[in-house]
Amino acid sequence: MPAAIETFEHIASVVDDGVHCPWPDLYRALREHAQSEWVVRSQRHANINPDERLSITRLHIRARSPELDLQLQQWFAESDMPHLIQWMLRGPFNTAAIEHWVILDALEHLAVLHLPPANAAPASPYDVTGAPSNSAIGGYEIVAETRWAPKRALINRAETLPPLELMIHDALGERRIHVMQTLVVLGVEKALKTPDGQQVRLKDQSPVSWQGETAWFVAVAAQYVSGMHLVLRLHDAGVDCLDAGSTNGSYVNGKLLNPGNWHLVKQLETVFLGGPASDPRSHTACVQLRVGHPVRAVGKDRTPLRTSPAQALPPKLLLQPLSDSDIGQVPVHTLPFTIGRGAGCDWVIPARHEMVSRQHLMIEEVDTLKQQVKLRDLSRQKLSVSQEGWRGAPAQGVWVPWSDTITIGKSDRHPGLSFCFSGTGRA
């Protein structure tokens, strides 16, 4: 098993009402509290009775500021108590040290306490026979009711194998990662800018938002790997992988994965990131996927880091590539929708279309009644062509009908990439 993750970098996110969402801070506070309080207390008790471990039976959480209190109440109201406890067991408390020294099987009660008045005297939220564990970390006050319980007997390791194991070969060498999350994104550590203007920092072993869901990010050190390169989704039937529109593509058995199309992963199958196995370029990374036991419906769990999935909404528009048969249909769920070779674009164009700018074209509006789309040319060399002709200046934003065909990156030596539009009703 890899070493336990001791740090967690804050990743800001925004909820619908524009208020800062500190749920990652809650994740960090729960983990730090368990490691600094519960683990240390259990280790000290082991000097007296090595056959007992600290067992957590009740957990109360209280925010220390009005902003955190508002978000904490929203977190508690988002799902029922069993799902929130499952999230904590699979997320903040899922480290080797916590699982070894702390028993969490008896945790059945979770409550969120309201922020006390400013002039109120501090008081314990409840009386317990055992000494409660109480501390304030990262703006949260965490109170646990505990008892001493017999240490669990050793169990068969085959029963605890993760559903997926990643064998990563990159510039850092070879390493194994056991995946316990439902959704995983592989890519390089970097800062990205989302279409709504938010800055997102991709950091190894930390959560990241992907299409409205929260995924676990695993960093790959390679020259031709994009920020968000490959997505892995665990489900009852196994594991699927998806190229997230990377610049240099993903390859399985020498075949390029089509961005937007899921591929069912087989046992011991290897995915090459940034080029095929025969690519002469240096630092071409590969990930071998070892599929383990079936996942028990973790994909249906609602977690406090998850927002409403963007894919639950019908696409506003469909883009159909014409000149590149390797690219499938691209749905447009949200606006504005950017097109280019940059990793931060909504539709990442493959690197072989070298005359396409990193941010080439933007879809600003969609009028389904008039069946037209408003486009804005963002490219430096203005290599965007309309088959029916522009009705204005593309750099200022122009309306084009769905019947039009747009070509980007076209020059005397390059044919460019052409695509047409299709409404969801006609698709």
Image: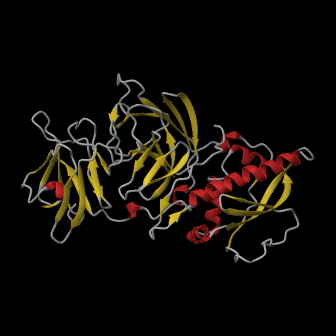
Picture coordinates of residue 348, whole percent (x, y): 30, 45
Say above or below: 154 vs 141.
above
Q: Is residue 349 above or below residue 299?
A: above
- Residue 393 percent across, percent down from the top left: 12, 56
Tell me which residue sits at (24%, 58%) in the image.
363
Q: Is residue 114 above or below residue 159?
A: below
- Left-right relation of 293 to 211: right
- Quadrant of the image occupied by residue 177: top right
Single out the residue that lies furthest toward the front: 119
Left or right of 66, for residue 145? right
Residue at image coords 45%, 71%: 17
From this viewpoint, is residue 51 visible?
no
Quick check: can you spot residue 410?
Answer: yes
Which one is in front, 337 or 54? 337
- Residue 331 vertical position relative to residue 218 in the rendered view, above or below: below
Please identify the quadrant where the N terminus is shown.
top right
Q: Compare residues 30 and 280 and report the one nearer the observer.
A: 30
361 left or right of 76 in image: left
